[in-house]
Image (cartoon, grey):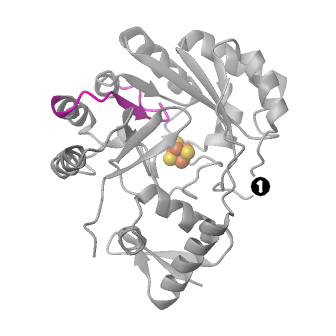
């Protein structure tokens, strides 16, 4: 069996970050939000508690090995299958990464914990932080991001503003739009009002071109995205990749392989990665695809999620 890659994946091509070498430091689907457009499916553990979910030593060991093998990337990106700022070792990890490589560090976060000074201090160690803002008011925030009960839109916006005051690196804010949920002019104007307070360096506009947690989520058409980008200002760039065609022959063949494997025995995410020789994010894409078609289900046993064919 090939040596399993547990925490480091890629590099994957990213519209926002070029060649991005990913690091995953929270368990699958642990997040402060439960966004309708999440590619991981429904979040299984919604929490705002920071914890030592993943120790940094094995993460650093794996990264060191990948770098020694000659892997190259434009960014080392901390993100993955949940909200990375929930890991209380985040700051230590970024500091340690900087001691072993000059590749800049980016953090993909939903930004909801930036109201905390310790989270801001951890994130400030990176070169680029990529938070999200998808709503301009509480009602829309509730509908699209389905936050933990202790997270409000004002808490999110104030945290982002406080971070802007302290952070000298780049903030690239993502706005994810879902047709009919946050696309009317009133909502876009409110989002723009918050962006003017936050003052990010760039705005990345995205929409649901990939499978999402909720089946009713509709992508915004390319022309309309350009109109919304125009409203949000000159620093706004459309990053949605309309060339994504998940149902390619290769995708379907791999999904069928996974399904036949799950018909024989339930597998954890780690099992799927090892069996198919792919990283966590790649495996999650196939699992989400099969789940959305009702072909597989999951059960938790001994704190591990197992997938099985229906
Ligand atoms: S899209 Fe990101 S922030 Fe939203 S639920 Fe999924 S992991 Fe959490």
| Residue 222 occupies quadrant | top right
Note whether residue 184 is visible. yes
Task: Report which residue position mark 1 lands on.
Answer: 216
Provide residue 248's location: percent of width, then percent of height. Answer: 67, 63
Q: Which segment is the magenta one? A: 99-116
SS class of the residue under badge 1? loop
Residue 133 percent location from the top left of the image? 59, 29
Which residue is outermost to the bottom?
A: 264
Q: In this view, does 223 lie to the left or right of 162?
A: right
Q: Is residue 291 above or below residue 213?
A: below
Q: In this view, does 17 lie above or below 195?
A: below
Residue 267: give x, y in percent of width and height.
Answer: 41, 78
Task: Examine the rendered structure and indicate whether residue 20 appears above or below residue 119.
Answer: below
The residue closer to the viewer here, 63 or 168, is: 63
Considering the whole magenta stretch, tell me its main secondary structure.
Answer: loop
Toward the viewer: 273 or 164? Answer: 273
- Ligand 1 is within 8 Å of the C-beta of the residue at disc 1: no
Residue sitting at 68 percent across and 25 percent down?
Answer: 136
Residue at x 28% of width, y 70% of height? 2
Residue 3 falls left or right of residue 278: left
Instruction: Write the residue at 25% across / 44% down.
Output: 70
Q: Quadrant of the C terminus?
A: bottom right
Q: Position of residue 204 (x, y in %)?
A: 61, 27
How crowded is the residue under tag 1: few (<14 C-alpha within 10 Å), some, or many (20+)? Answer: few
113 magenta-colored: yes
Q: Where, quadrant-wise, is the N terminus in this rendering?
A: bottom left
Q: Nearer the viewer, residue 11 or 177?
A: 11
Determine the residue positioned at 70% across, 13% down: 233
């Amino acid at each position: 069996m090939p040596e399993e890659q547990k925490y480091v994946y890629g590099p994957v091509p990213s519209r926002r970050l070029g060649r991005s070498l990913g690091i995953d430091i929270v368990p699958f689907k642990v997040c402060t939000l439960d966004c309708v457009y999440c590619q991981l499916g429904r979040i299984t553990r919604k929490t705002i508690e920071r914890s030592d979910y993943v120790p940094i030593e094995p993460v650093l060991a794996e990264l060191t090995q990948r770098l020694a093998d000659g892997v190259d990337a434009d960014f080392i990106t901390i993100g993955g299958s949940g909200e990375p700022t929930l890991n209380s070792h985040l700051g230590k990890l970024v500091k340690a990464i900087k001691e072993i490589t000059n590749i800049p560090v980016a953090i993909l976060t939903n930004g909801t914990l930036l109201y905390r000074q310790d989270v801001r201090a951890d994130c400030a160690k990176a070169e680029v932080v990529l938070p999200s803002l998808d709503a301009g008011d509480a009602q829309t925030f509730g509908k699209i991001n389905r936050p933990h009960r202790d997270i409000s839109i004002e808490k999110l916006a104030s945290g982002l503003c406080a971070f802007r005051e302290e952070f000298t690196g780049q903030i690239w804010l993502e706005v994810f739009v879902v047709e009919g949920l946050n696309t009317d002019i009133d909502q876009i104007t409110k989002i723009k009002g918050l962006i003017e307070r936050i003052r990010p360096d760039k705005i990345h506009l995205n929409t649901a071109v990939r499978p999402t947690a909720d089946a009713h989520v509709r992508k915004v058409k390319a022309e309309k995205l350009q109109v919304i980008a125009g409203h949000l200002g000159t620093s706004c760039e459309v990053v949605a990749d309309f060339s994504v065609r998940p149902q390619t022959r290769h995708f379907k063949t791999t999904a069928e392989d996974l399904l036949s494997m799950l018909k024989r025995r339930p597998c954890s995410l780690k099992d799927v990665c090892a069996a198919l020789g792919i990283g966590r994010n790649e495996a999650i894409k196939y699992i989400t695809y099969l789940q959305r078609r009702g072909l597989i289900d999951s059960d938790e046993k001994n704190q591990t999620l197992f997938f099985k064919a229906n």
